[in-house]
Amino acid sequence: MKNSILFTLLFIPLLINAQQEIPAINTAIVEYVSATIGTQVNRGECWDLAYEALDRNNAKWDGKFKFGRQINPKTEMVLPGDLIQFSNVELKYSEGNLHYTETMGQHTAIVYRIIDQEKKIFEIAHQNTDFSGRKVGLSEFNFGYVSKGKLWFYRPEPLN
């Protein structure tokens, strides 16, 4: 009995801190994205998906590229429903003998799912891409593959 109480007192707080509750607004944004996969949102620009997701969910943002509270993905957990703004980002990676380079000039995406929080690997939703055209599609994004450029991560915030 003493051992189980000691275990509870020592390890349960660690487990609670290892996972962060997803804010309601983030959940609503992911639900909106789920409903739009495979369709064109507005004009089909990458920014249109973020615009519609934020406005439909009464999120606070500047109407340009600041999509809520900026977070640091190196020190804070990234959550589904967070937004990413890319500026001249280049990704470099290898699979077997093949080497890949991808570029994202000015681009906006929404974190759809966390694949590996520790390694910062996410599934992102975006449109106006080579693979999905002007329709919303999902792709893997590995923060560790970024070789240059700038990224800003934002946590959406409700208006009230």
Image (cartoon, grey):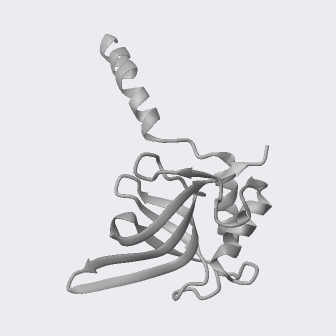
Quadrant holding the C terminus: top right
Is 106 on the left-hand or right-hand side of 45?
left
Q: Residue furthest top?
A: 2
Q: Quadrant of residue 147?
A: bottom left
Is 83 on the left-hand or right-hand side of 36?
left
Is 101 on the left-hand or right-hand side of 127?
left
Q: How many dots with numbers?
A: 0
Residue 98 locus on image (x, y percent): 25, 87
Residue 87 locus on image (x, y percent): 50, 73
Please tell me which residue is depicted at 36% across the width and 27% down the height of the picture. 11
Up the image or down, 151 lies above or below 99; here it is above
Q: Quadrant of residue 129?
A: bottom right
Is 126 on the left-hand or right-hand side of 103?
right
Please tell me which residue is depicted at 57% across the width and 86% down the height of the picture. 132
Up the image or down, 100 lies above or below 19; here it is below
Residue 86 locus on image (x, y percent): 51, 70
84 and 33: which is toward the camera:
84
Quadrant holding the N terminus: top left
Please tell me which residue is depicted at 64% across the width and 65% down the height of the picture. 65
Please tell me which residue is depicted at 32% across the width and 84% down the height of the picture. 100
Residue 113 locus on image (x, y percent): 52, 61
Up the image or down, 154 lies above or below 92; here it is above
Up the image or down, 39 lies above or below 4; here it is below
